[in-house]
Image (tube, rainbow, N blue to C red):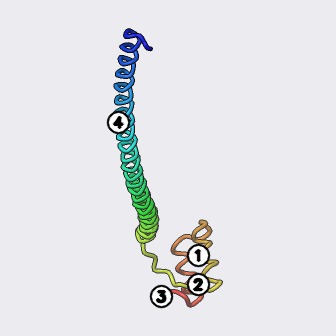
């Protein structure tokens, strides 16, 4: 037979074991809840990350368009500056095509071989001036 003292200890230990079993069950339930919560958090994080990556890609596309537009605008400005400088040149009332004699006389005038009156006289003598 089991002594009364030993029986009381066994009952006490059984009672403690039941309490521990209940606590373990509660802890398992809590762990399951935390795991579900983490899984939901991971899914939310993944969705948030995907949304941010889409936004970043959209901003990259806009930046590329902006950069392309800026480059085209700079090219247009450069072209207009060249055109403007060409238009700013004084108007020249020279014939589009000079014959060889006119080119020679013009070269002599430009290089100081002839003065303007000699140049005009030479043109008239060649039948090219007024």
CB atoms at circles 3 and 4 under 8 Å apart?
no
Q: Nearer the viewer, residue 64 or 50?
A: 50
Residue 17 in percent (x, y) is at 39, 24
Mark 4 or mark 2, which has the lower sequence index? 4
Picture quarter with the N terminus: top left
Residue 48 in percent (x, y) is at 37, 50
At mark 3, the secondary structure is loop
The crowding category of the residue bearing disc 2, from other C-alpha atoms within 10 Å (few below 14, some 14 to 19, many at least 20), is few
Determine which residue is flagged by label 1.
106
Disc 4 versus disc 2: nearer the observer: 4
Residue plotted at (56% across, 90% down)? 127
The crowding category of the residue bearing disc 1, from other C-alpha atoms within 10 Å (few below 14, some 14 to 19, many at least 20), is some
At mark 1, the secondary structure is helix
Distance, label 3 to label 1, CA atoms, is: 16 Å
Mark 3 or mark 4, which has the lower sequence index? 4
Q: Nearer the viewer, residue 99 or 75?
A: 75
**Which mark identifies residue 30?**
4
Mark 2 or mark 1, which has the lower sequence index? 2
Residue 47 in percent (x, y) is at 38, 53
Disc 2 versus disc 1: nearer the observer: 2
Distance, label 4 to label 2, CA atoms, is: 102 Å
CB atoms at circles 4 and 2 under 8 Å apart?
no
Residue 29 to residue 98: above or below: above
Disc 4 versus disc 1: nearer the observer: 4
């Amino acid at each position: 037979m089991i002594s009364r003292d030993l029986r009381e200890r066994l009952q006490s230990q059984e009672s403690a074991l039941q309490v521990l079993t209940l606590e373990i069950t509660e802890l398992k339930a809590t762990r399951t809840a935390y795991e579900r919560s983490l899984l939901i958090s991971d899914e939310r994080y993944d969705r948030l990350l995907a949304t941010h990556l889409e936004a970043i890609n959209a901003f990259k596309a806009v930046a590329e368009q902006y950069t392309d537009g800026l480059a085209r605008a700079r090219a247009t400005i450069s072209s207009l500056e060249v055109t403007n400088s060409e238009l700013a040149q004084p108007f020249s009332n020279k014939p589009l095509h000079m014959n060889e004699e006119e080119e020679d006389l013009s070269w002599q005038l430009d290089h100081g071989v002839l003065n303007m009156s000699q140049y005009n006289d030479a043109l008239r003598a060649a039948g090219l001036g007024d």
